[in-house]
Amino acid sequence: MTEESATKETDAYFTLSGDVNSDMVYRVFEAVANMTEKGIDTAHLLVQSNGGYVSDGLCLYNFLANSPIKFVMYNGGAVASIAVILFLAGKQRFASETARFMVHKSHATASPGARPDALNIIVEGLRADDARTESILRKHVTLTPEQWAVHQYSDLHLTATDAKTAGMVEAIADFAPPKGFHLTNI
C-alpha cells in the first residue's frame, strides 16, 4: 500500500450547515460514530452556520476537540456567533478569501412583565455563557484591544485576512475535496 492510498483511506470530506442546536449535535454525534467505525483519521469539515444555542455549540466544541479524529475546519462563507466556537475545535482551520466570521456576546429576550428575580436569572445565565465562550476564544484567538472592545458591546466581524491575523485560521484556503472523494453532508 502506498503512502498516498493510505492517506486516501483515512481522510474524509464533510459539510455541516444550519443552526447550532440539538439536531446538529445529534447529527455530529452520529457522523463521528460512523467515522470512527470506518477508521477515519482526518475529517475535513466545511462549516456554514450563523449560530444558534450556546450550550449546543459548547458541547460540539468539547466533543470535536477531544475526538480521536483530527478535524480540519473550513469556512467557505459565514461562521458566526456560537458556530465560531464549534469551528475553533479544529486542529487546523482555514477560510476562503471571501469568508467572514462574527462573534458577539450572548443575548436573550425576557418575557413581557418579567419580575426582577427572573431577569436576574437570565442575566446570570448570559454572563456564564459569555465567560465560557470568551475562555475558548482567548485560548485560540489573539484579538487586538480594539477588537475586544468592539466584541464587548457589539458584533465583531472578521474577514478571512482578519481571522488569519488573529490566529483563528492558519491560512486563507478553500475547501476543495480531491476528485474521487465522497462528500457527506452531516
Image (cartoon, rainbow, N blue to C red):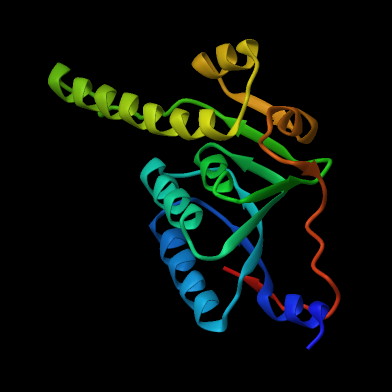
Between 112 and 2, the one nearer to me in the picture = 2
Residue 32: percent from left, percent from top:
50, 70
Residue found 46% across the figure and 75% down from its top: 33
From the viewer's perspective, tell me whether residue 155 is left or right of residue 122.
Answer: right
Q: How many marks?
A: 0
Residue 16: percent from left, percent from top:
60, 60
Between 156 and 88, the one nearer to me in the picture = 88
Residue 9's place in the image compared with 42, above or below, is below
Residue found 53% across the figure and 36% down from its top: 81
Rendered image quadrant of residue 39: bottom right
Between 29 and 18, the one nearer to me in the picture = 29
Residue found 68% across the figure and 72% down from its top: 12
Residue 123: percent from left, percent from top:
28, 22
Residue 115: percent from left, percent from top:
15, 20
Quarter of the image where the N terminus is located:
bottom right
Q: Is residue 62 visible?
A: yes
Q: Is residue 113 visible?
A: no
